[in-house]
Image (cartoon, rainbow, N blue to C red):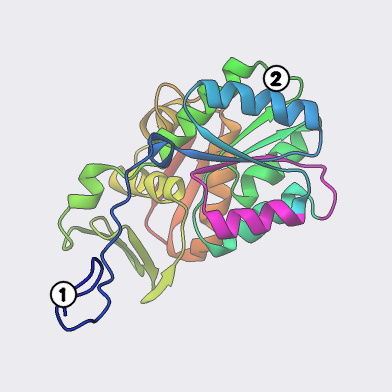
Amino acid sequence: MTAQPGENPDGDVIVAPVTRMTDAADLADHILIIEDEENIASFAKMYLEADGFRVTIADRGDDGLELARLERPDLVVLDLMLPGLDGFEITRQLRSAGRMPIIMLTARDDPIDKVVGLELGADDYITKPFNPRELIARVHAVLRRSEPDPIDVAGPDDLVLTIASLRVALGGREVSVDGEPVALTPKEFDLLVLLVENRGIVMTREQLLERVWGYTFLGDSRTIDVHIRQLRRKLGDACQIETVWGTGYKVVAPR
């Protein structure tokens, strides 16, 4: 019997692999906007898509959290006041599950809200009404900061900084205290490395912002204070980060 197309000579059906053409949209960074004000969400989506991003919108907090978990976007633009689940709780849950860049977008201009958001792990904070160009600039800046440093990725695994019970492995970007792993965000890790490498030396807030966040960072020096507070909480007495009032911070050996 002559074999038909899709069969081999024995009559078995051949399942050929499907070759999928790569769509340009697949290569674009994916931004998830969780915002219940339709005009603001559509406005932000329009500008982000015009800048080349792929954008998804959720208008409820619980739906947005589920989308973030399923689709793993490259960045989340997150409102604070949402039906279903507020932005603070979404940030907390996303941070407990791993690293995902978050920009908080809110009408609340209370500095306490900003500090709480940053302490929970948000990367930046924009107050409504906002300039769409500022939003795009901050999205680009946060995405750049979230990319792993090639030096860190390729660094030697045996390059380790230690202070008493604190161990910081640069190659693997791992931190432990008394042998127990400590989970740090990428910026917390970079900030800790800079302070430990310069132990005993006072680093100003401006120096820390420049070296860890870069020249393009649009936030303010309170970002440093929030991250220092988080490091102190996570590391306990294993690393003494002293405040030098009016100047900055320095690491000293535990007493």
Badge 1 is on which residue? 2
Q: Is residue 205 visible?
A: no
Quarter where residue 43 is shown: top right
Q: Mark 1 is on which residue type?
A: Thr
Query: Which quadrant of the rendered structure holds the N terminus?
Result: bottom left
User: Pointer 1: residues within 10 angstroms few (<14), some, or many (20+)?
Assistant: few
Which residue lies under the disc numbered 2?
130
From the top left corner, tell me how far across and down residue 225 is, in percent.
Answer: 57, 40
**Nearest the camera: 62 or 235?**
62
Image quadrant where residue 215 sits:
top left
Q: Is residue 66 magenta?
A: yes
If the image is split into quadrants, where does the C terminus sit?
A: bottom left
Asked whether 207 or 95 is in front, the reply is: 95
Horizontal relation, residue 154 to residue 239: left or right: left
User: What is the residue that sits farthest to the right in this orientation?
Assistant: 83
Q: Return the residue nearer the eye: 200 or 18.
A: 18
Q: Nearer the viewer, mark 2 or mark 1?
A: 1
Q: What is the span of residues highlighted in magenta in the rendered image?
A: 62-84
- The magenta stretch spans residue 227: no
Q: Is residue 178 left or right of residue 39?
A: left
Closer-to-camera residue (218/208): 218
- Residue at 30 percent of width and 58 percent of height: 18
Q: CA distance from mark 2 to mark 1?
A: 69 Å
Question: Which label's residue is closer to the chain start, 2 or 1?
Answer: 1
Residue in the picture at 47% in, 39% down? 249
